[in-house]
Amino acid sequence: MSYTIPAIFDAGVFRPLKPVELAEGTQVEVQVPTSSDERLPEEIAQQAGALAWPDFVERTYGSCADLDLKRHEQGEFEPREPIA
């Protein structure tokens, strides 16, 4: 079984921020993110509620500039009746 545990690195020791259901002495593998973003997943999720769309635009703007993307002909669309 594998799951993510938020933790703080303090005085050379990883300290969990939430209770962990592991027996004392259990050996675990710690994966440290290589991103420069040092926020915890909860902080990112909280911020995403207010800034999800602008943050997405800022992070992805221009990411496809070097791709040779072409829009195909769209054709004719059937006229629709207005909604009453």
Image (cartoon, rainbow, N blue to C red):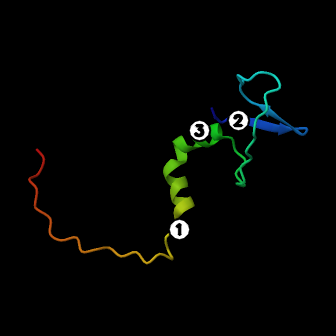
Q: Secondary structure at mark 3?
A: helix
Do the numbered discs 2 and 1 sit on residues whose CB atoms are within 8 Å?
no
Residue situated furthest right in the rendering: 11
- For marks 3 and 1, give the CA distance: 25 Å
x then y, percent, for residue 67: 47, 75
Q: Position of residue 21 (x, y in %)?
A: 70, 22
Residue position marked by numbered label 2 in the rendering: 6
How far is disc 2 from disc 1 in space, using C-alphas? 30 Å
Image height of 40 relative to 65, above or below: above
Near mark 3 (Cα within 10 A), the count class, few <14, some 14-19 or many ≥20, is few
Relative to 79, is 11 on the left or the right?
A: right
**Quadrant in the picture for residue 24:** top right
Q: Nearer the viewer, residue 21 or 57?
A: 21
In this view of the protein, which residue sits in the foreground, 60 or 14? 14
Q: Which residue is mark 1?
A: 63
Q: What residue sits 63% from the left and 32% below the top?
A: 1
Mark 2 packing: few (<14 Cα in 10 Å), some, or many (20+)?
A: few
Q: Amino acid at mark 2?
A: Pro
**Of helix, strand and loop, which one carries label 2?**
loop
Callout 1 amino acid: Ser
Q: Tell me the crowding category of disc 1: few under 14, some 14 to 19, or many 20 or more residues within 10 angstroms, Cα based.
A: few
Q: Using the image as rendered, state which of residue 38 and residue 30 is in the foreground.
A: 30
Kindly identify which numbered label has been placed on residue 46: 3
Nearer-N-terminus badge (2/1)? 2
Q: Nearer the viewer, mark 2 or mark 1?
A: 2
